[in-house]
Image (cartoon, rainbow, N blue to C red):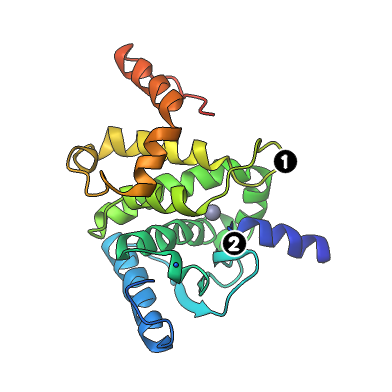
Amino acid sequence: MKKFCILFLMLLLVLPANAFIVDETKNGEINSLVNKIGFSILNANKIPYRITFSVKQNSKYLIASSSPRNRKIVIYKNLLPQIDDEDELAAIIAHEISHGVDSNEGIFKGFFSFYEYLAAPKKYEIKADKRAVDYLVNAGYNPVAIIVVYSKLLPQPRYDWFMFHPLPSKRMMYIYEYIFNKYPAFLVNNKYKTNLYYQNFLLTSQQNRKKLQNKIQSDSQKILRYE
Ligand SMILES: [Zn+2]
């Protein structure tokens, strides 16, 4: 059971723990905002599953989680001061909604989906990131916010060999490539062009973006292995 709990925790968006658009002392405001964003994404994307949202006290290890058992998405308060706009918060929520959708699909209403995740967690994390891009665009949010918020919050281990999540540098590049191919207007008219965290992504992803540039120039369809 203890092992299971540890594995379960690994499923969640693990992040380390600055002012946001809502007053953190007003729990009602935070809950309303999280619900507004969450239900907007669900409705705009015509997601036919019941998924609910709540805001909880700080977590030592998490900023957000999606329970595969009751499809409840939790935002932990330590996330909020680190979020600078509503798109960023929507980005985190959209990623967790994607996990929530997976946990509803498959036989026995997705009963085994968690085990499928455990078998290939990195694949499902990349899937959740890309699907979050679609969810955000359909709900009227800016998908580049995912790159911004990951650039700001996700620490970069040396390797991801034994980790559930892919290296954040890889995740941001797969998101960037996905936006580049499917929603290029967000990169052409990029509201985050001068954003510190986005600029840092551009600085630290030069080699990866060179790979992408070569792929585009050679008209290749291969899946790139980013660093
Ligand atoms: Zn995830």
- Residues at marks 2 and 1 touching, judged by CB atoms closer than 8 Å: no
Q: Quadrant of the C terminus?
A: top right
User: At which x and y percent is residue 30?
Assistant: 39, 80
Q: Which mark is residue 162?
A: 1
User: At which x and y percent is residue 117?
Assistant: 62, 50
Left or right of 110 in this view: 150 = left
Left or right of 4 in this view: 111 = left
Ligand 1 within 8 Å of the CB at mark 2: no
> Of marks 2 and 1, which one's residue comes earlier in the chain?
2
Ligand 1: image quarter? bottom right
Amino acid type indicated by mark 1: Phe
Outermost residue, right direction? Answer: 2
Residue at the spot x=75%, y=61% of the render?
A: 6
Amino acid type indicated by mark 2: Phe
Few, some or many residues within 10 Å of mark 1 (<14, 14–19, 20+): few
Residue nearer the viewer, 141 or 145: 145
User: At which x and y percent is residue 184?
Assistant: 23, 37
User: At which x and y percent is residue 155?
Assistant: 57, 49
- Disc 2 or disc 1, which is closer to the eye? 1
Ligand 1 within 8 Å of the CB at mark 1: no
- The Cα–Cα distance between marks 2 and 1, rounded to whole angstroms, is 30 Å
Is 157 rendered above or below residue 68? above
Residue at the spot x=44%, y=64% of the render?
A: 82
Residue nearer the viewer, 138 or 175: 175
Left or right of 35 in this view: 54 = right
Q: Which mark is residue 108?
A: 2
Secondary element at image label 1:
loop
Total numbered labels: 2
Residue at the spot x=37%, y=76% of the render?
A: 35
Residue at the spot x=62%, y=46% of the render?
A: 121
Is 128 rendered above or below residue 220? below
